[in-house]
Image (cartoon, helix red, strand yellow):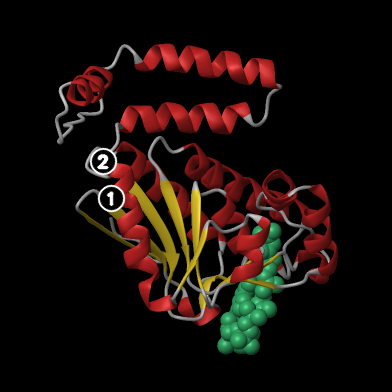
């Protein structure tokens, strides 16, 4: 896959997507958002890719937000179009049937914090910094921040971060639930790849169905969520991988060969 603003490398079932605009600290302009949308669509369709890791180029920044130089002269309709572009790309990322890991290597501000929240898991380097600085620019979080942040860290913490524009470090992000782990900067990608490999040992369809149950279940009432879970649980019984996982267990075997069917 060739892109102007992204680097995509895939090996051993893991796709590493690097947002590559180091001169602007990997800020997201419309072109990059469109490329991300296209890239996520292609990775979703690629059966050789089992897990996607998303990171930023350079040592300083994951993504320093939406591109302010593009937004400064944008009109209200243009701002809305940009928000809709991000909405489509980030939702595609969030709903991808395979697991996604944000490897946050530095600043994750505004749209950077927002894209990390659309990933299933976030691993932060010790150098990472998170924040939603939009109200200091006369706008508000527009790439999902007002919706995903309170769902992740709670209403009060989300409001504090958005109203103050405070930047928090990796340990605070871990404490409030924005990051799953904090690791030394030079170990970040290896750590994420090792986690991806642990995920790849398990049945891919089970992960897809569990992801659906979690993502949809969080936005419906508990009864609807539990019903959805029971239905998807039932569906998993129709897979070859359920037979494989349980038969190997009962036969005290070691190797399970999941085929994603
Ligand atoms: N958009 C465009 N350019 C950006 C950028 C952004 N979001 N963030 C950084 N840059 C550019 C800077 O303009 C600078 O360019 P020049 O070298 O041409 O001057 C270059 O990247 C390096 O940045 P700094 O010199 O500012 O680096 P620093 O180390 O002094 O500071 C920083 C780093 C704290 C991240 C600072 O760059 C900064 O505050 N960036 C803006 C962060 C921000 O406000 N993000 C939110 C954007 S709005 C948004 O994301 C809306 C939404 O909901 C999606």
The residue depicted at 37 percent of the width and 28 percent of the height is 206
Q: At which x and y percent is residue 255?
A: 15, 35
The residue depicted at 28 percent of the width and 20 percent of the height is 242
Quadrant of residue 201 within the rendered picture: top left
In this rendered view, identify the residue nearer to me: 137 or 151. Answer: 151
Q: At which x and y percent is residue 81?
A: 66, 49
Ligand 1 is found in which quarter of the picture?
bottom right
Examine the rendering and report whether any part of residue 16 can be seen.
no
The residue depicted at 71 percent of the width and 55 percent of the height is 79
The residue depicted at 78 percent of the width and 69 percent of the height is 165
How would you rate the neighbour count of disc 1 (Cα within 10 Å): few for under 14, some for 14-19, many for 20 or more?
Answer: some
In this rendered view, identify the residue nearer to me: 25 or 77. Answer: 25
Q: At which x and y percent is residue 225?
A: 62, 21
20 on left or right of 150: left
74 on left or right of 124: right
Secondary structure under the numbered disc 1 in the rendered image: helix
- Tag 1 near tag 2, CB within 8 Å: yes
The CA distance from mark 1 to mark 2 is: 7 Å
Q: At which x and y percent is residue 112?
A: 58, 63
Secondary structure under the numbered disc 2 in the rendered image: loop
In the picture of the structure, the residue carrying the numbered disc 1 is 197
């Amino acid at each position: 896959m060739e892109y102007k603003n992204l680097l995509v490398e895939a090996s051993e079932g893991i796709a590493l997507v690097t947002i590559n605009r180091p001169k602007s600290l990997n800020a997201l302009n419309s072109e990059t958002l469109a490329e991300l949308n296209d890239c996520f669509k292609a990775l979703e369709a690629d059966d050789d890719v089992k897990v996607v890791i998303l990171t930023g180029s350079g040592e300083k920044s994951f993504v320093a937000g939406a591109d302010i130089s593009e937004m400064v002269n944008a009109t209200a309709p243009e701002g809305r179009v940009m928000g809709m572009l991000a909405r489509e790309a980030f939702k595609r990322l969030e709903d991808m049937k395979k697991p996604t890991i944000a490897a946050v290597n530095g600043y994750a501000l505004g749209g950077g914090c927002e894209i990390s929240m659309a990933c299933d898991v976030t691993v932060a380097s010790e150098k990472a910094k998170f924040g939603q600085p939009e109200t200091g620019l006369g706008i508000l979080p527009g790439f999902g921040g007002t919706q995903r942040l309170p769902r992740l860290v709670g209403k009060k913490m989300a409001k504090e971060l958005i109203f103050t524009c405070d930047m928090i470090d990796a340990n605070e992000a871990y404490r409030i639930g924005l990051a799953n782990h904090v690791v030394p900067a030079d170990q970040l990608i290896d750590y994420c790849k090792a986690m991806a490999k642990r995920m790849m040992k398990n049945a891919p369809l089970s992960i897809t169905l569990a992801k659906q149950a979690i993502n949809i279940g969080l936005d419906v009432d508990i009864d609807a969520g539990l019903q959805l879970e029971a239905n998807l649980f039932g569906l998993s019984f129709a897979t070859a991988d359920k037979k494989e996982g349980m038969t190997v267990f009962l036969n005290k075997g070691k190797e399970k060969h999941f085929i994603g069917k």
